[in-house]
Amino acid sequence: MVRQIAARWLMAFGVVTGLFTACNDADFTVKGVVSEADGQVMYFENVGVSEVVTLDSVRLTAAGKFKFSRERPKYPDFYRFRLNNQWINFSIDSTETVVFSANAGTFATSYTVEGSENSKAIKAITLAQLDANQAIGKLQKEYERGLVNDTLYREQMLEIAETYKEVGRKYIYSAPMSTAAYFALFQKINGLLFFDLYDKNDSKAYGAVATSFDYYYPESPRAKHLHNLALQSIKVIRRQRALEEEKINIEEVSYLDISLPDIKGDTLSLSAVARNRVVLINFTAYQSEWSPALNMELADLYAKYQAKGFAIYQVSLDNDAHLWKNVSSRLPWFCVYDSESVYSQIAALYNVRQLPALFLLDRKGNLVKRVDDITKLDADIKSIL
């Protein structure tokens, strides 16, 4: 099915030859000038699927010149410059030289880039994302002051998000195989993804990019995780619509694995916990006022179903590791900690939009439900077991 869809995308958009070349034995170079940054350190980082790695750094002089060269990636990849908690995001698609010009004060917004059309598109997407976040911030202040009622607040929130998504769709549907399309999918508003994996319209955007990446770069990590995301999205949406099983013509899809440290400091993966178990994945924050009540309810369910093959994999997004250790040490289920807190890449991949967030996996590792009503969680677990 995926190959057939890919063929249709090829007919729709044409074969883009030379967009991402196949060889990987040459270097790429990024260089430029950052004005008014004398003595400041700029970092050059690789932005992976689930982590950011610092590759190099430079202490800028009054002239502001910099230059980095690296072996080009095997597959299209994302990088960024970081200066004083401001970022310039860009992508590398081939052996190329990309030139930047920026000012330290407006580093993330007013820079120029030459030598990479995808990086120019990434700038436009970034600016649309920043505009949306500023609009949301203004709206939230008005709501807190009582100037906007609940209904208008929700409507305007959706309008702001839709304005960003209109920009994102332009790049997603015009060139779904591009790094710009991928970048547009994963931009956030207040730490949450604009494009909702479990919304039937947004799911089409994930499917478009996933299909193209699956065709052009089937062995790349990004293609594989997009493939799983798109299939997972379709499965959940179809289950929510209660379609008969015989009408679902889609392959089984595994969960998105998580590997994070437990209280002992050992890495504990979701895949290790999920073997032949029904698993409740819970993204939480122990410092929240609702956390004790939630954990008491989970404790009752755990005691009731643990012997039947039920497990809880609880991911803490607290910004206080000491608090997490104190609380999790008293809990009987599997507890792990994500130090990225609200900026968690893992939570973003699961499209966690608010806390607590709960998901259920069946014994085969299929994400069968996103729990919206915790009062029905007992019945949900029982039905899956």
Image (cartoon, rainbow, N blue to C red):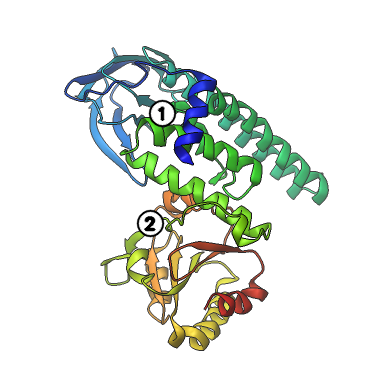
Q: Is residue 196 left or right of residue 299?
A: right
Give amino acid for label 2. Ser
Q: CA distance from mark 2 to mark 1?
A: 22 Å
Q: Is residue 54 left or right of residue 299?
A: left
Question: Is 110 in front, or is 269?
Answer: 269
Q: Position of residue 28 (x, y in %)?
A: 24, 20
Kindly identify the residue that appears in the image at 65 percent across and 61 percent down: 244
Kindly identify the residue that appears in the image at 47 percent across and 40 percent down: 2
Q: Position of residue 32 (x, y in %)?
A: 31, 14
Q: Secondary structure at mark 2?
A: loop
Residue 337, image quadrant: bottom left
Q: Tell which tag, 2 or 1, sits nearer the viewer.
A: 1
Give amino acid for label 1. Asn
Q: Is residue 127 left or right of residue 263?
A: right
CB within 8 Å, label 2 to label 1: no
Kindly identify the residue that appears in the image at 54 percent across and 54 percent down: 352
Q: Which of the numbered marks, if any, corresponds to residue 257?
A: none
Mark closest to the chain's N terminus, 2 or 1: 1
Q: Secondary structure at mark 1?
A: strand
